[in-house]
Amino acid sequence: MHSVCVTGAGGFVASWVVKELLAKGYIVHGTVRDPDDEKKNGHLKKLEHANERLHLFKADMLDYAGLCIAIDGCTGVIHVATPVPAGKVTNPQPEMLEPAITGTRNVMNACLKSKVNKVLVVSSMTAIFVNPSWPKDRPMDENCWSDAEFCKKNEKWYCASKVISEREALEFGKKNNLNVVTICPAMVFGPMLQSTICTTNTILLNLFKGKNSFNLGELDKPEEDIPIPIVDVRDCAKALLLAYEKPEAEGSPCGLNEELNYTCEKIMKLGWSHRSLEETLVDSVKNMKEAGLLS
Ligand SMILES: NC(=O)c1ccc[n+]([C@@H]2O[C@H](COP(=O)([O-])OP(=O)(O)OC[C@H]3O[C@@H](n4cnc5c(N)ncnc54)[C@H](OP(=O)(O)O)[C@@H]3O)[C@@H](O)[C@H]2O)c1
């Protein structure tokens, strides 16, 4: 089985991707900022088959040389790492835009250098829906892009970082004949493998406690009083694996939630299905109780 590099391996979504890859027999190169940080990354070493097939590499997304070492020898890359805001972004360039955009450029260049066969870039629904000119009655599909200038003007730095890096990744792929596929998950909830709580599960935990903290996900303005699509982290990881493994996956599989105004037809055609929201919520409560976050 070939080797796959997963960037930001210790994060919420990436940890499930690493688990799935190991379960399927892949050799995994995981990039983390500090392989010795047991609080952040210790859970990865306890995953089944981690002893035999998981190799952790130290790399910040701005560390091109470190990324080259991690990606060298890999057939594919699943690029997950990006800063996800956990509060107001005060210094957007270094906090959000640079690690996301320059980080993605670094990953792309390292992939080209190592002659990687396929790169899957995890984008976000935030790269889709901040589009004031999209007709209200038309489902948002892979032709719908957030307006990066509008995002910046309205200080939606995370949304700006996602739409700019996704577009650049696809353009880079076309220009350099590199197979790049992007995927735009809805808001991800569900059980955590890691021991530090991520931003979206903080939002969920606060909801369980009766508090609205959607502002953490830049969804705080009145014009965004919109229904928010949700995907389970385990289904999200499965979708990423499908998009990675299926040769027919191309371009930008949008959505990851067939309800509301988003279409996820492309990923459904690859064979994706998902569990019920009820199951996600029940398992999240159980997971948060076990972690001592909920009583
Ligand atoms: N959660 C959602 O609802 C959702 C929805 C759609 C898309 N996504 C996308 O899914 C991906 C993962 O999100 P998540 O929810 O799993 O968040 P997360 O748990 O915060 O994971 C983000 C990962 O990126 C790493 N990272 C951030 N800045 C970095 C840098 N400069 N250099 C190296 N690594 C860096 C983090 O490492 P540290 O721990 O060291 O900071 C962490 O491992 C992101 O691309 C996000 O945009 C998430």
Image (cartoon, rainbow, N blue to C red):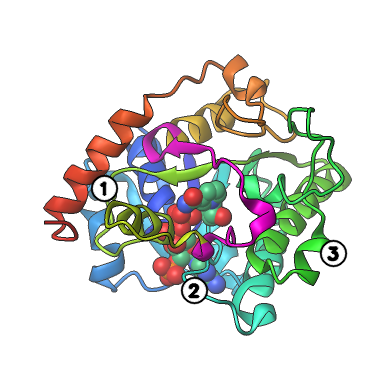
Dot 2: few (<14), some (14–19), or many (≥20) neighbours within 10 Å?
A: few
Residue under pointer 3: 149
Identified at 52% across, 35% down, the residue is 240
Q: Nearer the viewer, mark 1 or mark 3?
A: 3
Disc 2 residue type?
Gly
Point out the residue furthest to the bottom here.
Answer: 91
Q: Is mark 2 within 8 Å of ligand 1?
A: no
Instruction: Identify the image quadrant of the N terminus.
Output: top left
Q: Tell me if residue 1 can be seen.
A: no
Q: In the displayed structure, would residue 182 be above or below residue 211?
A: above
Depth check: 4 or 8 in front? Answer: 8
Q: Which residues are magenta?
A: 215-235
- Magenta-span inclusion, residue 88: no
Q: Which mark is residue 87?
A: 2
Identified at 84% across, 64% down, the residue is 149
Please tell me which of labels 3 and 2 falls first in the chain.
Answer: 2
Please tell me which of labels 1 and 3 falls first in the chain.
Answer: 1
Q: How many marks?
A: 3
Could you tell me residue 37's position as x and y percent? Answer: 29, 73
Label 1 to label 3: alpha-carbon separation = 43 Å
Q: Nearer the viewer, mark 1 or mark 2?
A: 2
Depth check: 127 or 150 in front? Answer: 150
Could you tell me residue 64's position as x and y percent? Answer: 63, 70
